[in-house]
Amino acid sequence: MAPRVVVIGLASDFGCQVQMTNIEDDLLDVLGLIDLQYWQLASSGHMPDSYDVAIVEGAVTTLEHIATLERVRATASAVIAIGACAVTGGIPALASHGRLEERYSLVYGDGPSVAPGRIKPQAVDSVIDVDYRIPGCPIDMGEFVQVLSRALQGLSDHLPQEPLCAICKTKENVCFYERGEVCLGVLTRTGCDARCVSLGRPCTGCRGLAEDANLESALRLLDERGIDTSDVLVRARLYNTLEEAFTR
Ligand code: SF4
Ligand code: SF4
């Protein structure tokens, strides 16, 4: 029997689920391997009670999300978090600092107040154990197919560890710091093939902090080059605001 898969969206713009429709050539192969029972973006039916693999997109922003995740964890043998919102809290997590009421009034003034059941945005693995993570905003479809295949075969998670600069160097890109521009490749987890940098745009850190990123060292080096490190920190918080290094 093919593994039964569900795709669930929490708080996000559904960009990673839309990205999943771009698998193109691989889509039929992937669909041939699984029994796709529910895809929130594309299904009109209800979530089934029983399934094997749950793919979760989006940050946790409500008590209902927590209850959903607890049900998912109790049911699925493999949980895959996809996209920056699910993996690091992503952009929704920018609202996690201070009191939620204050964040609402900053945006809406005297408009709508915090709805019952709303909580500070957080990553999926702060609520339940996650077996596989696919970072990025949006996810890379090659990586999605690889990770889903690993999950279907019961192989362990295999997240790239090193910072993006390691791959960027092999692409022979001219470093943005040579031009005095900020690029977050020094801190960011590789795995995207240095996509933005190779297209001429600095990395904004959507894949989260690299496991062996040395924030203090990187900031010291950049400071020595005359780069405004406070600007680097502000930019790095965009996708990484819940990282311990930024909550001190
Ligand atoms: S800082 Fe950016 S441009 Fe420079 S090497 Fe690293 S990834 Fe490439
Ligand atoms: S280069 Fe940086 S911003 Fe672009 S996809 Fe890779 S990690 Fe994300």
Image (cartoon, rainbow, N blue to C red):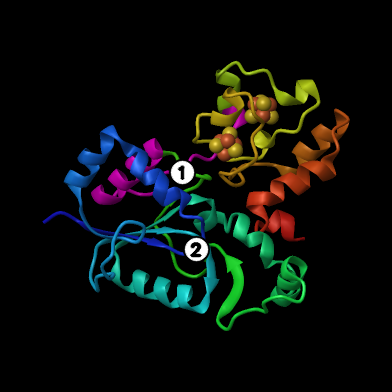
Q: Residues within 10 Å of mark 1 (few under 14, many from 20)?
A: many
Q: Residue at x 60, y 21 (%)?
A: 169
Instruction: Tell me which segment is drawn in magenta.
Output: 141-166
Q: Position of residue 15 (x, y in %)?
A: 47, 49
Q: Residue furthest bottom?
A: 116
Q: Which residue is mark 1?
A: 139
Asked if residue 194 shows in the view, the reply is no
Q: Classify residue 13 as left or right of residue 47.
A: right
Is 66 drawn above or below residue 231 in the view shown?
below
User: To which quarter of the image does residue 91 belong?
Assistant: bottom right
Residue type marked 2:
Asp
x then y, percent, for residue 96: 67, 66
- Furthest residue toward front: 111
* Mark nearer the N terminus (1 vs 2): 2
| Image depth: mark 1 or mark 2 in front | 1
In the rendered image, the residue lying farthest to the left is: 1
**Ligand 1 lies in which image quarter?**
top right
Secondary structure category for the residue under label 1 = loop
Element at label 2: helix
Q: Is residue 106 above or below residue 234?
A: below
> Is 188 placed above or below 120 here?
above
In reply to whether residue 112 is colored magenta, the answer given is no
Which corner quadrant holds the C terminus?
A: bottom right
Verify whether residue 154 appears in magenta: yes
Quick one: label 2, few (<14), some, or many (20+) residues within 10 Å?
some
Q: Give how far across and how far down residue 245 sits, in percent.
A: 71, 54
Q: Disc number at residue 60? A: none
Report the front residue among 74 and 101. Answer: 101
Q: CA distance from mark 1 to mark 2?
A: 17 Å
Query: Which is more toward the observer, 223 or 49?
Result: 49
| Location of residue 230 by image quarter | top right
Dot 2 corresponds to which residue? 125
